Image (tube, rainbow, N blue to C red):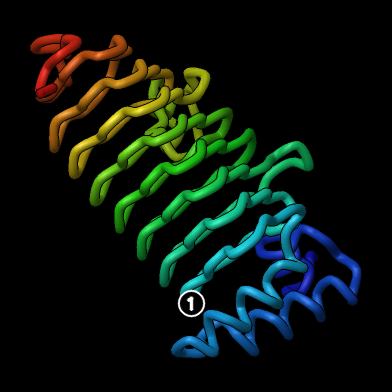
Amino acid sequence: MVSRLRRYQELFIGQYDFLSFLKYELIISSFGLMPGAVGLYLRGVFYRSLFRKIGKDVVFGRNITLRHPGKMILGSDVVVDDNCILDAKGTKKSAITIGNGVFISAFSILSMKDGVIEIGDNTRIGSHCRLETSTRLSVGRNVLIAYRCYVGAEYYHFERLDVPISQQGKDLQGGVIIEDNVWLGAGVVVLDGVTIGRDAIVGAGAVVTKDIPEFAIAYGVPARVVRKRTRGEGET
């Protein structure tokens, strides 16, 4: 039987030696909930040692959950707001890479069981968003993801009636690609297997089940392209 300590190490740390466990526990328990500017400063100093690689001037809010931080790469000037979850558990090849200047707002989740998550430079992720994958999730540069978006929703097999759906496994579609300069409105759902082209806009509450071409404006359930953005639009 796997011990509780072993399960904890599998879930949160990804390493099984005692020193890694002790370092993780001391840092998270000492500084994770510390309030104010002192807490921000000390987390910025001590959390660095938990990551595979990290840039300069990274800000960590309070009560952040880090699972397998040794598989994460963070660029410079990244902000991870209060109560976020960064979860890179999975195989040794699993990884989360976050570019420079990325802002992840409060209560948002980046999660995987396998595969990789890549967030490009200067992307903004609104509060209460969930980005997850079992294969690949790639978000480009200068992307705006508004409040309560769900990116990477996956399908389950459901053909058998004698087996619970939760035990039939996932029908993976290859992941999600969101190219540069895309804007997802509040509450958008992007399903597994979708690519959203550069400079596209997806209206609030849309469910994206198929690819959206570049410069398109789409909305609805399911999302449909209503028109294309044109050069000179809004320019003075």
Residue at (46%, 89%) from the top-left corner? 35
Return the residue nearer the eye: 230 or 184.
230
Residue at (72%, 50%) from the top-left corner? 71
With 160 as the anchor, is 115 left or right in this view? right
Residue 108 x/y as whole percent = 39, 57
The vertical placement of 217 against 131, above or below, is above
Return the residue nearer the eye: 125 or 26.
125
Residue 89 x/y as whole percent = 66, 50
The vertical placement of 67 against 215, above or below, is below
In the rendered picture of this protein, how many numbered marks are placed on residues?
1
* Kind of residue at badge 1: Asn
**Residue 4 location, quadrant:** bottom right
Q: Which residue is mark 1?
A: 63
Residue at (71%, 67%) from the top-left corner? 48
Return the residue nearer the eye: 149 or 12.
149
**Residue 122 location, quadrant:** top left
With 131 as the anchor, is 219 left or right in this view? left
**Name of the residue lying farthest toward the front:** 236
The vertical placement of 27 against 47, above or below, is below
Residue at (73%, 85%) from the top-left corner? 26
With 14 as the anchor, is 66 left or right in this view? left
- Residue 142 seen in this snapshot: yes
Residue 231 x/y as whole percent = 19, 10
Q: Residues within 10 Å of mark 1 (few under 14, many from 20)?
A: some
